[in-house]
């Protein structure tokens, strides 16, 4: 019994750092590069190769990755260092949310415009009831005459 | 029918106009100061308010009102900034007793790198932090380093796009020291 408990304790003791090591690093520079900007280059960090600031930014991310920080924690730190414009995707609140809202409104307006046009086209089309009215007496007589001629 | 169409499109057009207006309003004339200076005018300096680098609190342009202020925009990753900083430090020693100062504005930089730079270059003049370059844009800065000289009345008296040298300091800064507030 004591031997089994000691074994379980040893497994826990050895297993804990291994589990922690497996969880770290939680992200990588490559994973973040296309989601953040090089502020002075005006392009994403993935594209900015020559800029000295991009090199500093990569070094900072690398340091944070080594400290086992998550992707969101690293992004938060980059925002603290360079401001919100460092993020490649604008935040979903404040005025920047218009980047998401405007295409959405555009889509809604396009659907509404299409619906309006379809409604108008349908109104302009000839009424099917008119085409299916019963023949008049004159038409019926003419039809009979034509059929007689063919017989 | 016509009203229904207007109800959909008018708000959309209004939104586009508002967005365009916002974009135009946030475009700064990058060379407005240069143009004013070339016409012999001294425009009022933008009223910046920035946190201090490596220290608590914020600093405002008004904190140095009555002094000649050499506002130097720099970054630790900028090689010419490294080259000009000893000259600025030398001038700070000369200016500090005459109602004038150099103010370094670290822009678009990693704060720890900037502090390391300041420590290595032994900078003693006040250092501020402009993390997203907003203050730099207000001054029309498009590259680093750039320096804007303010007279004792808080007006822009000279601009140097690129590293400063002794000639600039002698010709543009020294004459301002004798001016009244």
Image: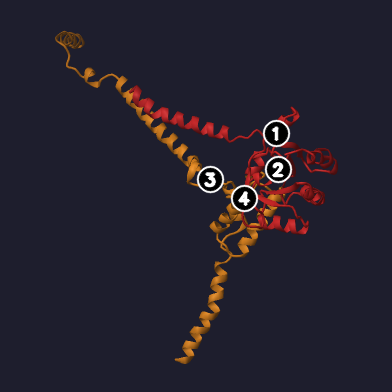
Q: Are marks 3 and 4 in contact (CB under 8 Å)?
A: no
Q: Is residue B128 above or below residue A70?
A: above
Q: Colour of chain A?
A: orange
Horizontally, is B154 left or right of A106 in the view? Answer: right
Residue B115, x across and y down, in percent: 70, 57
Residue B65, x across and y down, in percent: 68, 43
To which chain does the residue with label 3 belong?
A: A
Q: Which mark is residue A82?
A: 4
Horizontally, is A68 left or right of B140 in the view? Answer: left
Query: Residue under circle 1?
Result: B33
- For the point 74% across and 52% down, which residue is it? B125
Q: Are marks 1 and 3 in contact (CB under 8 Å)?
A: no
Q: Residue furthest bottom?
A: A2
Residue A115, x across and y down, in percent: 35, 30
To which chain does the residue with label 4 belong?
A: A
Q: Colour of chain B?
A: red
Judge the density around disc 4: few (<14), some (14-19), many (≥20) Cα neighbours within 10 Å: many
Which quarter of the rendering shows the C terminus of chain A?
Answer: top left
Q: Have a look at marks 1 and 3 and say if they share a chain.
A: no
- Name the secondary structure under disc 2: loop
Quarter occupied by residue B139: top right
- For the point 53% across and 72% down, which residue is it? A19
Q: Have a look at marks 1 and 2 and say if they share a chain.
A: yes
Query: Residue under circle 3?
Result: A90
Q: Nearer the viewer, mark 2 or mark 4?
A: 2
- Decide which of A69, B137 is in the foreground and name it: B137
């Amino acid at each position: 019994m004591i031997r089994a408990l000691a074994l379980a304790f040893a497994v826990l003791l050895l297993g804990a750092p291994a589990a922690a090591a497996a969880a770290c690093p939680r992200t990588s520079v490559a994973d973040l590069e296309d989601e953040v900007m090089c502020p002075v280059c005006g392009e994403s960090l993935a594209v900015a190769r020559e800029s000295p600031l991009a090199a500093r930014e990569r070094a900072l991310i690398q340091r944070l990755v080594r400290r086992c920080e998550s992707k969101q924690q690293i992004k938060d730190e980059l925002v603290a260092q360079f401001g919100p414009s460092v993020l490649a995707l604008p935040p979903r609140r404040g005025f920047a949310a218009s980047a998401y809202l405007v295409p959405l409104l555009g889509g809604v307006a396009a659907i509404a415009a299409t619906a309006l046009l379809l409604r108008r086209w349908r109104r302009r089309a000839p009424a099917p009831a008119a085409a299916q009215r019963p023949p008049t007496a004159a038409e019926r007589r003419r039809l009979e005459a034509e059929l007689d001629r063919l017989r | 029918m016509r009203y229904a169409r207007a109800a959909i499109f008018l708000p959309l057009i209004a939104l586009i106009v508002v967005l365009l207006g916002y974009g135009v309003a946030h475009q700064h004339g990058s060379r407005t100061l240069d143009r004013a200076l070339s016409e012999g005018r001294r425009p009022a300096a933008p009223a910046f308010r920035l946190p201090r680098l490596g220290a608590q609190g914020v600093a405002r342009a008004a904190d140095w009102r009555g002094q000649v202020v050499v506002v130097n925009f720099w970054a630790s990753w900028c090689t010419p900034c490294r080259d000009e900083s000893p000259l600025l430090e030398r001038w700070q020693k000369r200016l500090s007793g005459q109602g004038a100062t150099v103010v370094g504005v670290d822009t678009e930089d990693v704060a720890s790198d900037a502090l390391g730079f300041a420590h290595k270059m032994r900078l003693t003049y006040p250092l501020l932090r402009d993390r997203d370059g907003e203050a730099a844009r207000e001054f029309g800065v498009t590259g680093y380093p750039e320096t804007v000289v303010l007279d004792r009345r808080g007006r822009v008296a000279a601009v140097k796009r690129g590293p400063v040298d002794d000639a600039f300091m002698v010709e543009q800064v020294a004459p301002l020291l004798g001016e009244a507030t």
